[in-house]
Amino acid sequence: MNPDSVVIDLEKLRLTIAETLELDPEEVTDDAHFVDDLGADSLLALEMQIALEEQYGVRVTEEDLRAATTLRAAHTMLIRKTASRKGRS
């Protein structure tokens, strides 16, 4: 594996999101929509934003959250953000 590649553990992310949304991790499937399927609201979105920023050391904007509507999309967004952060160091 390339030492410069960015790895975001999908299961760790699933646990973080499940905890934030107060759900069992099994409910947070790869393609479950945070709002439509899992009942996230704006307050929970803000909590998720803070949790992801703290856990992964990246800045997550409101636009990022609007685009990252599923676990799979959030995972992709975090990989992109951590990779670009690494490129700037």
Image (cartoon, rainbow, N blue to C red):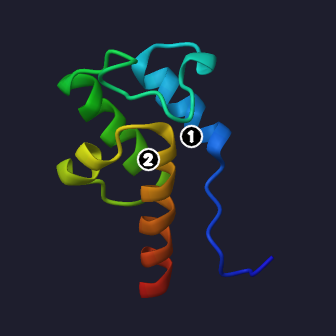
Image location (x, y in percent) of residue 39: 32, 15
Upstream in sequence: badge 1 or badge 2: 1
Residue drawn at the location 31% of the way across and 31% of the way down:
47
* Front one among 32 and 56: 32
Crowdedness near tag 2: few (<14), some (14–19) or many (≥20) residues, C-alpha within 10 Å: many
Q: Is residue 89 visible?
A: no
Give the tally of numbered discs.
Answer: 2
For residue 11, what is the image quadrant? top right
Image location (x, y in percent) of residue 38: 39, 17
Is 56 above or below relative to 87? above
- Structural distance between the alpha carbons of marks 1 and 2: 9 Å
Image location (x, y in percent) of residue 20: 42, 24
Left or right of residue 61: residue 50: right
Q: Which residue is mark 1?
A: 13
Residue drawn at the location 46% of the way across and 27% of the way down:
32
Residue drawn at the location 51% of the way across and 50% of the way down:
75
Q: Which residue is mark 2?
A: 74
Which residue occupies the extreme right position in the image?
1
Q: Quadrant of the N terminus?
A: bottom right
> Of helix, strand and loop, which one carries label 2?
helix
Q: Are marks 1 and 2 in contact (CB under 8 Å)?
A: yes
Is 20 above or below relative to 53? above
Amino acid, disc 2: Ala
> Of helix, strand and loop, which one carries label 1?
helix
The tag on residue 36 is none
